[in-house]
Amino acid sequence: MAMSISELKTLLAGSAGPSFSLTATQLGVCSVTKLFGSYLPQSTLTIANPRPEVEALQLKGQMTLGSVVSVETLVTFLADETKTFVAGINIKLDLASWTFNTPFANFSGSALLGFGFTSPQLVLAAGDTKLAAGVPAAFVSGALTVRGKTETKTVTLSALIPFDTPATRAGIANNYVFAVELDVTLADLNALSQFIAADFNIIPDTIPLADTFALKHVEFAIDPQRDRLVSLRLTVGSAKGMTVVQNIFEIKSFRFSFQIIMPAPGVTTKAYGVVTTTLEVYGQRIDMSLTVPQLYLYGQLGHDRPIPLKPFVSNFLPANIVPDNFELSDLAFGLGLTDPYRYTFDITLKNLWSIPIGKSTLDMKRLSVYLEGQGSESPGLSIQGEIKFADRIT
């Protein structure tokens, strides 16, 4: 059973002394037990020179973990929704640099300094829904200043430390992805150059741009072996829409996602982008995306619910050409807007024909049609179906 908050407060109040130790068994929380077993020596939290903040459910002091020796540490105990029992823990160790070695990870991220990162921390957490949905895990985090049109914010970006995978057991081979969701108003797309020197004015003129943009996501990917930035992803929202066909094809807003793949030395840094939006077509949501500068358009149904085909098609064609029970379950298409104009079209129909044969029926359960081609060349066509006859599916 999990330790009660009143028991925890009593424990913290009596933590004065040269050292304080706590085992997962004492807390009685499954996720904390897994966290301690994975990341702490002898599955025990040991804090030197403990300084409790009882009402805040916090304990300050120093902690040692691998090459991270006697650093300032803040332990925060998390209560459940009723504020009655302990439900999790968050342990933050202040780091002196962006390089450390621990039993579970070796990390070199000094390259982050060149992009304005400060205040490195090693974080161990379980039950903290703000980090990896609360699962037991370790993170590296740092602070970054973001300059907006009217304000400057300092945000914290955290990267999940890969653990207990074949790659990590052989030596960290995974990139660390430092990411944060935020909402900062930017005057224009050039404001994104505060993160890296690149040209972000790559959106086609046919797409309207708002007067300001909302920075929504920042993501740095670091290779911890080479100690270098691998890629940078920035996402902004643009509140200005457009009307293609009034009351039919109307777009309320756009979302622009820019990605920088770090080039070889001496090669110019280039931004690539994806423009995304959602169309509401006669009550059905169509998710759309356009790659930039490649100008490849892709669309698909924005939900996984089958659509009765006849009512939908009747908005465009005579309704009597479609049987009543047909359903559209999948729809996707792609179109290159530059030469050689490659295209794809993929559609799946369900709940089709049912033909009586003797005492049984032949049911066409599913029909998929895939079309692929380019320009004026003859396209390739693939048709697949699923037939059920006498309780057998082929």
Image (tube, rainbow, N blue to C red):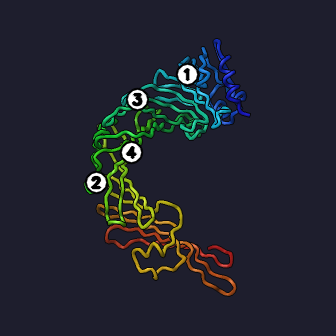
Q: Disc 2 vs disc 3: Cβ atoms closer than 8 Å?
A: no
Residue 191 placement (x, y as % from top left)? 30, 39
For the residues carrying marks 4 and 2, which lies nearer the camera in this image?
2
Residue at figure coordinates x 34%, y 61% from the top left: 336
Q: Is residue 39 left or right of residue 144?
A: right
- Tell me the kind of residue under disc 3: Phe
Earlier-in-chain disc, 3 versus 1: 1
What's the mark number on residue 117?
A: 3
| Quadrant occupied by the C terminus | bottom right
> Disc 1 marks which residue?
73
Earlier-in-chain disc, 2 versus 3: 3
Instruction: Tell me the SS state at disc 3.
Output: loop
How far is mark 2 from mark 3, CA to CA?
Answer: 33 Å
> Disc 2 marks which residue?
208
Instruction: Tell me the SS state at disc 1.
Output: strand
Instruction: Tell me the SS state at disc 2.
Output: loop
What's the mark number on residue 235?
A: 4
Give the class, few, some or many, for how many residues have Cα within 10 Å of label 1's Cα (few <14, many ≥20): many
- Tell me the kind of residue under disc 4: Thr
